[in-house]
Amino acid sequence: MAEGGGSAGRAAGWSAQERSVESRIVKHVKKSVLLWYTPTEMYELVTGIEQYPQFLPWCDRAEVLEQHEGGVTARLGLHYMGVRHAFTTRNEHVPGESVMVQLVDGPFSLLDGTWLFRPLGRPGSEAEACKIEFDLRYRFASKALETVVSPVFDRVANTFVDSFVQRAEAVYGPR
């Protein structure tokens, strides 16, 4: 029997795990918001990882495992609606401007994200407002994890920016 040259032939040669990963969907959350807080204020909230359990209802623990030049490696505990998992990310920081998040380990086969903090204001004056752009892509490591964790993590990912906006109001006051 001759091997096929099309995608069906390639799929037949893949392991069950490779076919399973290929068939799972990469989820993508993209949000932006304009705020009367400075880029530095919002950057400090996002990089204040150890404070997450105080205002993210799904986060039961947050720990900076390592500080390195340009960022940190951190582990977050997810505990929400009876689902409990943890994941580790390596975060690259550009102070007051951005945070890039890359998966180290956890229930994902893919997790990468970007926070951008864009100043808004008159040229030459200090920014009194900012635009936050949040972009997150993720895929679970197995169909079983996707079935159990996805409904919870989908909700978490879609409310992440809102949680930081509420935190800014609590920390810096309403503006």
Image (cartoon, rainbow, N blue to C red):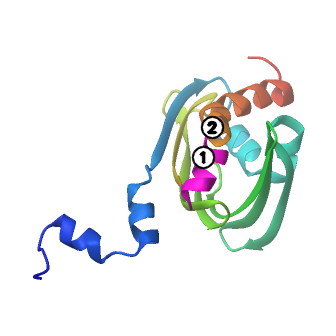
Q: Residue 166: give x, y in percent of width and height.
A: 76, 25
Q: In the current view of this chain or complex, which residue is farthest to the top?
A: 175
On screen, residue 167 versus residue 95, left or right, reads right
- The vertical placement of 64 against 81, above or below, is below
Residue occupied by mark 2: 151
Quadrant location of the N terminus? bottom left
Q: CA distance from mark 2 to mark 1?
A: 7 Å
Which of the 4 image quarters holds residue 170?
Answer: top right
As for residue 71 lying within the magenta part, the answer is: no
Q: Residue 90: give x, y in percent of width and height.
A: 65, 66
Quadrant location of the C terminus? top right
- Amino acid type at mark 1: Thr
Segment tinted magenta in the rendering: 140-151
- The vertical placement of 131 against 90, above or below, is above
Query: Quick check: can you spot residue 143?
Result: yes
- Amino acid type at mark 2: Pro
- The vertical placement of 119 against 9, above or below, is above
Which of the 4 image quarters holds residue 112?
Answer: bottom right
Count residues near mark 1 (Cα–Cα under 10 Å), then give few for <14, some for 14-19, many for 20+: few
Residue at image location 64% in from the left, 48% down from the top: 96
Residue at image location 11% in from the left, 74% down from the top: 5
- Residue sitting nearer the eye, 37 or 77: 77
As for residue 146 lying within the magenta part, the answer is: yes
Which of the 4 image quarters holds residue 143?
Answer: bottom right
Residue occupied by mark 1: 147
